[in-house]
Image (cartoon, coloured by chain):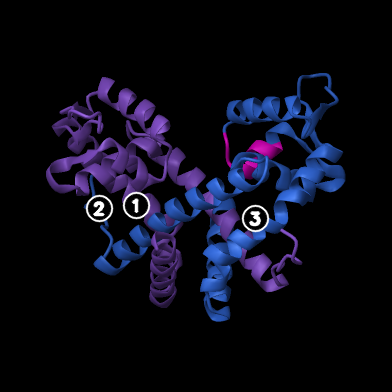
Chain colours: A blue, B purple
Amino acid sequence: MTETPRWLSPAQQNAWRCFVRMQEKLNGRVSRDLQAESCLSAADYRVLVHLADAPDGRMRSSDLARSVEWEQSRMSHQVARMVKRGLVCREGCFKGGRGTFVVITPDGRRAIAEAAPRHVETVRRLFIDLLTPDELRTLARVSRRVVEQLEK
Amino acid sequence: MTETPRWLSPAQQNAWRCFVRMQEKLNGRVSRDLQAESCLSAADYRVLVHLADAPDGRMRSSDLARSVEWEQSRMSHQVARMVKRGLVCREGCFKGGRGTFVVITPDGRRAIAEAAPRHVETVRRLFIDLLTPDELRTLARVSRRVVEQLEK
């Protein structure tokens, strides 16, 4: 890196720091509340949400890891713990070692259905209800744009 | 929870999902880029930024954990690894077991100074440069409001 770095302007730096701080605080609190009020950690919940949304509740383990942006090894450990608790199961094992599928179980669907009402209440109280409809629209628009750029 | 859950409206649910997705993708990518282009993980960087901003580069270990919203045990493991690499050191140990201080070392300051230009470039390319000044202002305002509510 030989060129002069394009440092952020004070307004940009302030916005970025506020945003990072908000994510730290919000995600920390949402995770703790979820754990306290259900049998699920934030990691369990994320995995279950992705599976519950997938056709037949099943995803290839590597695709699941990619969806939540984890290393495959972290996902394998997470899935192993969830298999033990009966929230998901592994299925199939193709020739050529292309990896197994992870499938949400009826217990997994029940766990997420039970956790959802309180989780939604937390998300409302700590985030959604604090934003105006205009601010929410801006947030959704910006989020889509950033994700599109990342997926290019 | 006996009352009917106040489920999110479609617009609210869409905004929340987009926002969660954006955080997953953006944080995953920013972390990988940081790791690839410097000697620091995202966790190292977060800890060093908080210390570098603190008076005399030192914080009580419990305050540091609270700032980044981690459990104390996770922070202890993280700090132990960073001590081994010479990025921070532990200092003092008061009677009554109120815990030690963590201090950024000159090597820690050097590491963050070296990582910063590329990290800023990543943050610009993947986020800041994609938002209009108005959108950035909205984001900063919303972030401050959410953090204030969380700190009440």
Magenta segment includes B61: no
**Dot 1, crowdedness within 10 Å: few (<14), some or many (≥20)?**
some
Q: Residue at x 41, y 45 (%)?
A: B69
Marks 2 and 1 close (CB-CB < 8 Å)? yes
> Which label lies toward us, 3 or 1?
3
- Mark 3 touching mark 2, by CB under 8 A? no
Image coordinates for residue B124, horizontal then vertical, percent: 38, 57
**Residue A7: x, y in percent?**
25, 57
Binning the other alpha carbons within 10 Å of mark 2 as few (below 14), some (14 to 19) or many (20 upward) gives few
The kind of residue tagged 3 is His
Q: Is residue B19 left or right of residue A53?
A: left
Query: Label 3 vs label 1: CA separation?
Result: 36 Å
Q: Which residue is mark 1?
A: B121
Helix, strand or loop at label 3? It is helix
Q: CA distance from mark 2 to mark 1?
A: 7 Å
Whether discs 3 and 1 lie on one chain: the answer is no
Q: Residue at x 69, y 25 (%)?
A: A80
Q: Chain of mark 2?
A: A
Local secondary structure at mark 2? loop
Extent of the magenta region: A63-70
Residue type beneath disc 1: Glu
Q: Are marks 3 and 2 on the same chain?
A: yes
Check the residue under mark 1 and report the chain it is in. Answer: B
Q: Is residue B72 left or right of residue A126?
A: left
Mark 2 on the same chain as mark 1: no
Name the residue tied to disc 3. A119
Q: Nearer the viewer, mark 3 or mark 2?
A: 3
